[in-house]
Amino acid sequence: MNTFNPPNNMTIADFPFPIHTGAIKPKWAEEAQKKGYNILARIVDRMHLALQCKLCGGISKVRHYTLTSANPLCSHCIEQVWQVDAVAAGLEFIKRDPARRNYAFYRMPCGHEISRQFELIKRVAAGETGLRCETCRAAMEVSEAAALGWDLIGPDSEGDPNYRIFQHAECGHTQRIARANIQTQRFSCGGCGIDWPAAPSFIYLMRFISATGRELIKAGFSRNPTSRMHHQLVVGQEMPCEILRTVAVPTGRQALCIEKGLHKMLQLNHPECIVDPASYRGQIRVASEIYDASLTPTILGHLDDIEAELGTNVECRAA
């Protein structure tokens, strides 16, 4: 039997494997046809065959024992599946990772290369999980810290992936801070920071729209009302919400006293406006101090009085 059957007028010089002398046994050719291949040649040594996939036309090196005892997989067809999965996941397949057989290199939309498991890319393509670029994430962490006056020094000294080591640009103090606290801005410097009772704070009024469409409002105090609204109060980011008014207060302790007095007055004079917690459970992370939006003008009036009494003359700010 002919030992070399080049496809599409391919020459021996063009063939991707060195040709090995020797006949192709009829039983090998029969098995190859049954399993979706044509045998093109014996290659490399007496143990290997060049198989051409009838489906994609790709040429693979396979042991003749594997051909007769199993169903060899076409590496080219498999790679096409990887490429399709990559496109569905919004990536570009580059090549298989030679160091890890279940991984491949992909190019992210940002242009950076990553190495990920094939199964993870399938899950991303199916919408079951997301994917992030370590290079972009690192740059984002540096930018987030810099916006708050901190320098990102490096990973956590205790090995916790949720923490980083930061240095305060103003005073030079170095400390470990949870990344979530950097994002929500809920931390202070251990070197020059002021604890919340003495730190400046705000009395705020927020508005929420529940899943039923009902408008709800909440009055309270916080050193950072925007962070409190988005990262502590609202359960789902799709819930419409906004800050209607803030009043600056010199200290957190004073803000706490003002808030308690305000709620006591509202609950005494407007009990009909107190909203049942069951109506917003799972949407706002509080169990009380939520009022119907009809009380908005009344609370805004109280905040005007509070600001006048404090003598802050701070411009009203909305979110």
Image: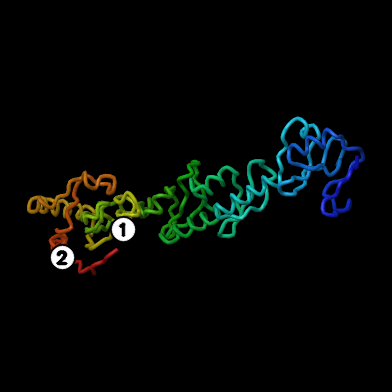
| Residue at horizontal 15 percent and vertical 65 percent from the top | 304
174 shown above or below 101: below
Residue 72 image-quadrant placement: top right
199 shown above or below 276: below
* Alpha carbon separation for disc pair 1 and 2: 20 Å
Give the labeled residue for mark 1: 226
| Residue 260 placement, left or right of 121 | left
Residue 311 lies, in percent from the top left, at: 17, 66
- Seen from the viewer's position, the closer of residues 30 and 15 is 30
Residue 40 image-quadrant placement: top right
Label 2: which secondary element: helix
Residue 5 lies, in percent from the top left, at: 86, 46
| Residue 9 placement, left or right of 306 | right
298 shown above or below 77: below
- Seen from the viewer's position, the closer of residues 274 and 162 is 274
Task: Work out whether residue 6 can be spotted.
Answer: yes
Residue 120 lies, in percent from the top left, at: 55, 44
| Residue 7 placement, left or right of 175 | right
| Residue at horizontal 41 percent and vertical 53 percent from the top | 182
Label located before the other in sequence (1 or 2): 1
Give the labeled residue for mark 2: 304
Q: Which disc, if any, is residue 57? A: none
